[in-house]
Amino acid sequence: MNPMPGIATITLNPAIDQSVAIPGFAAGSVNRVAWEQSDPGGKGVNVASFLADLGCRVAVTGLLGRDNAGVFEQLFSGKAMSDAFVRIPGNNRVNIKIIDEVTPSITDINFPGPAAAPEHLAELARRIDALLADHDCFVISGSVPAGVPAAYCPDLIRRLKMAGKRVLLDSSGQALREGIAAAPWAIKPNLAELEELVDTPLPDQAAVIHAARALLGSGLACVLVSMGRDGALFVTADACLHAIPPEVTVKTTVGAGDAMLAGFIAGSLRGWSLADCARLATASALGALTQIGPRLPAAAIIESFMAQVTVRQIAAAAGQSPASSQSTGSR
């Protein structure tokens, strides 16, 4: 049996995610911290971390501020990820997540990151070229820092596709809109990002499916739409599946979408059916919801979650009602 292809994630704007628990958090008042935890993050770093937990061979690259790179380097070493990041001057940004377990709610405070210079992007191009030989799948994730031109992501996608690579894009705003023009293999917007992309509210499932199917006309093979408690939609030219998760105790929502993408990638590269990819993707997101930081619980727990995920096939014609209900178990 051939080993699963290598996967490389590209993170242009990594971050240190600082989770701070403040029961009864109130703006404009003195708040006391119950506990805090800091983890290396940024969407691409998170995806890579979750992929490593799922047993995948992963390389990480992008732009990494050298002044506080140590916490990232510990993660890469601890999970046996190949580190191909370009070090740039300055600190990586910090994203503060205020977790109120009483409400419950999460308040995000995101700082800007260091700007990229042309020489950093040139060196990154060389690092990516060096990964082409033994990595078949590339994941471009997260926001774009200052100094990166609008054409960067679509140009990179086209270059990777010309090299015969499978490319997935998980971004938002202009970076997502520009990237879609280069027709990556798949994208993973959440509901708000999809509404921004199509510039219209999507009030129900039929509207979401219609918007996702319209995007397939741009040359995409799959649109994965994460919808929080309502699960996720997996839309291809041949199928539309709705994965419905069981209830779990949520510790944080940070990284859940990244874990979903990682599970989808891992299943796809193993040659699984779309339904089983949807189960692993949803189970991985559930696993992330129960952990603080970019890590998954034990494999047995992920298997248990997979068995509890319901995957329904949505009628192709109208996109409004389930055509059939598939079994909840995994393969």
Image (cartoon, rainbow, N blue to C red):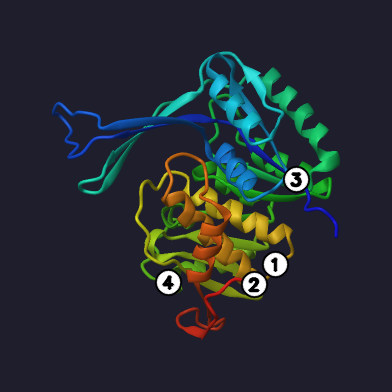
The x, y position of residue 130, in whole percent, is 82, 32
Marks 3 and 1, the one that precedes in the sequence: 3
Mark 4 = which residue? 205
SS state under label 2: loop
Quadrant into which the C terminus falls: bottom right
Quadrant into which the N terminus falls: bottom right
Q: Which amino acid type is marked by label 1?
A: Trp
Q: Which amino acid type is marked by label 4?
A: Gln
Residue depicted at 25% across the width and 29% down the height? 33
Q: Which numbered mark, 4 or 3, is in the foreground of this view?
A: 4
Q: Which mark is residue 331?
A: 2
Q: Is residue 31 visible?
A: yes
SS state under label 4: helix
Marks 4 and 2, the one that precedes in the sequence: 4
Q: Which numbered mark, 3 or 1, is in the foreground of this view?
A: 1
Mark 3 = which residue? 158
Mark 1 = which residue? 272
SS state under label 1: loop
Q: Is the residue under label 2 in contact with that under label 4 (CB below 8 Å)?
A: no
Q: Is residue 219 visible?
A: no
Q: Is the residue under label 2 in contact with that under label 1 (CB below 8 Å)?
A: yes
